[in-house]
Image: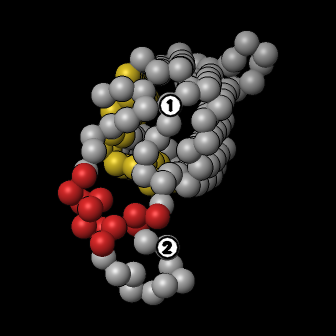
Amino acid sequence: MGCNGGRELTYLKWKVARAAPLNPTIPRLSDMPNSITMQNSADNMDVVAQDQTFADCIAEGSHFEGATLTRVTFTRCDLYWASFFMAQLTDVTFDRCDLRGSDFKDATMRDCRFLNCDVGTDAIGGQTEFGDTDLSTVQFVNCRGR
């Protein structure tokens, strides 16, 4: 898929958009952002996305704080200094991505894969940060800096 889109679930969106909310004070799923924007400094905060694939994108300094990503794949993406602070990542794959200086502190990561990624020191000495994030189900394969 491209850098600004993924698999569209048009029928599901149509069904959700027409469903009456159970509680009017809780936002409906259709009101939540559900598409990732892959460009420099993009605001993907609180996005809820699944089953999307991105390849050859440049999204340096993008914000994914509080995002919920499920079955999302990033291939050869430049995510230098991206922030995944407090994000929920399930079955997310980073393949040959530049993640130098990225922030994964306090993220919830389950069954994620980092394949041939650069997770080391950036050009000004900043490091990819995982903080106290539980990495027990995360795989790092042939990553530089890890």
- Which residue is pictured at 75% across the width and 24% down the height? 126
State the image coordinates of residue 65 (x, y, percent, origin top left).
61, 49
The three-letter code of the residue at mark 1 reads Met
Q: Quadrant of residue 2?
A: top left
What residue sits right under mark 2 in the picture? 27
Q: Quadrant of residue 146?
A: top right
Which of the two residues, 81 or 126, is positioned nearer the viewer here?
Answer: 81
Please name whichever residue, 65 or 109, is drawn nearer the observer in this view of the structure: 65
Q: How many marks?
A: 2
Up/down of 48 relative to 111, above or below? below
Furthest-right residue in this view: 124
Give left or right: position of 35 versus 107. left
Give coordinates of residue 29: x percent, y percent: 40, 66
Q: Residues within 10 Å of mark 2 (few under 14, many from 20)?
A: few
Q: Position of residue 5 (x, y in %)?
A: 37, 35
Nearest the eye: 70 or 114: 70
Q: Residue furthest top?
A: 123
In this image, 18 relative to 36: left or right?
Answer: left
Going by the numbered disc 2, the residue's amino acid type is Pro
The residue furthest left is: 11
Nearer to the camera, 123 or 74: 74
* Above or below for 66 versus 92: below
Residue 74 can be seen, yes or no: no
Q: Earlier in the sequence, mark 2 or mark 1?
A: 2
The extreme bottom residue here reads 23
Q: Residue at x 43, y 45 (%)?
A: 35
Residue bearing the label numbered 1: 38
